[in-house]
Amino acid sequence: MKPLWQGVLLGVAAYLFFMLATAPAAKVLPLVQPRGVSIAGINGSLWSGHAALVTAAPVQLTDVHWRFRPLALFVGQLGFTVTGDLQGQRVKANAGNGFPGDPQLSDVQGRIAASTLLNLLGLHQPQLGGMLEFDIADIDWPASGYPALEGTIVWTSARVSGPYELDLGKVVLETRIEDGVTRGTLKNEGGALLLQADVEMESSGAYRFDANLQQKGDVPQPVMKFLATFAEYQNGTYRLEWSDSL
């Protein structure tokens, strides 16, 4: 009888899963959406659907589509592959909800204007040019504050356009997560100011920047004055240790 009961239970579980997956998303998603996330204009099913707007402050995605990822259940997640528009640029990610309700976000890929990112962070200076292309393998969400990131961000045609002009070429940031803190390396090539740095940022927004910088082209006088004041100069290299908070 044991194999029979196992078959019955498996059939019941499969039926319940089918009913849940094909249920109207407008009824199911409000019950399982992660904290801090709001979804509007929902249609379709939990298996495959669309939302006009998904907000996880300060980020807003429009024209969002998702498909259910059944294999995510084996690692304790209600997971989806999600695509949407972020400030006019298409992004893709694996997203969902863990049990008992922790948000999950990984494999985030897309691009955004550097100036737009500063606006999302509420920063108005400096003014930046160029595009940020990101490939974030994992995101660790704290109870409050900024998340920790593991992945690669490439800033192409990187430049500061205000309050002064500074060409930075191509900038690459590679990060990892250690005890909920983002740590990584930052370097560039082809710019007027060559830099190599160790970086660190906590969920509170406090950050640290330890860098070696070398002048390779025309650098604005305010930047050179800043380096002369706050950095240690030796054998053509400025050593700068800087910490602040967003």
Image: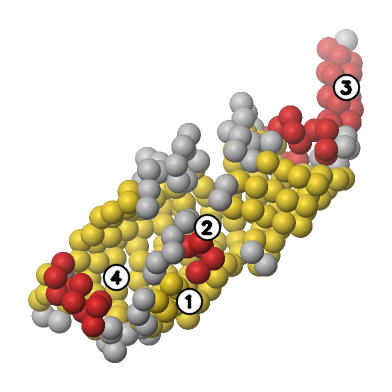
Is 17 situated left or right of 117 in this image? right
- Which residue position holds label 1? 129
Along the line of sight, the residue nearer the viewer: 44 or 71: 44
- Residue found 14% across the figure and 75% down from its top: 228
Mark number for residue 12?
3
> Mark 2 vs mark 3: which is more N-terminal?
3
- Which residue position holds label 4? 196
Q: Distance between the Cα atoms at labels 4 and 2?
A: 26 Å
Looking at numbered disc 3 in the image, what kind of residue is underneath it? Answer: Val
Residue 39, percent across and down? 72, 43
Q: Are marks 4 and 3 in contact (CB under 8 Å)?
A: no
**Where on the picture, by quarter, is residue 19?**
top right
Q: Distance between the Cα atoms at labels 2 and 3?
A: 46 Å
Q: Are marks 2 and 1 in contact (CB under 8 Å)?
A: no
- Which residue position holds label 2? 120
Q: Distance between the Cα atoms at labels 4 and 1?
A: 20 Å
Q: Distance between the Cα atoms at labels 4 and 3?
A: 58 Å
Along the line of sight, the residue nearer the viewer: 107 or 217: 217
**Callout in the foreground (4, 1):** 1
> Mark 1 vs mark 3: which is more N-terminal?
3
Residue 193, percent across and down? 29, 80
Residue 92, percent across and down? 66, 58
> Mark 4 vs mark 3: which is more N-terminal?
3
Query: What kind of element bears circle 1?
Result: strand
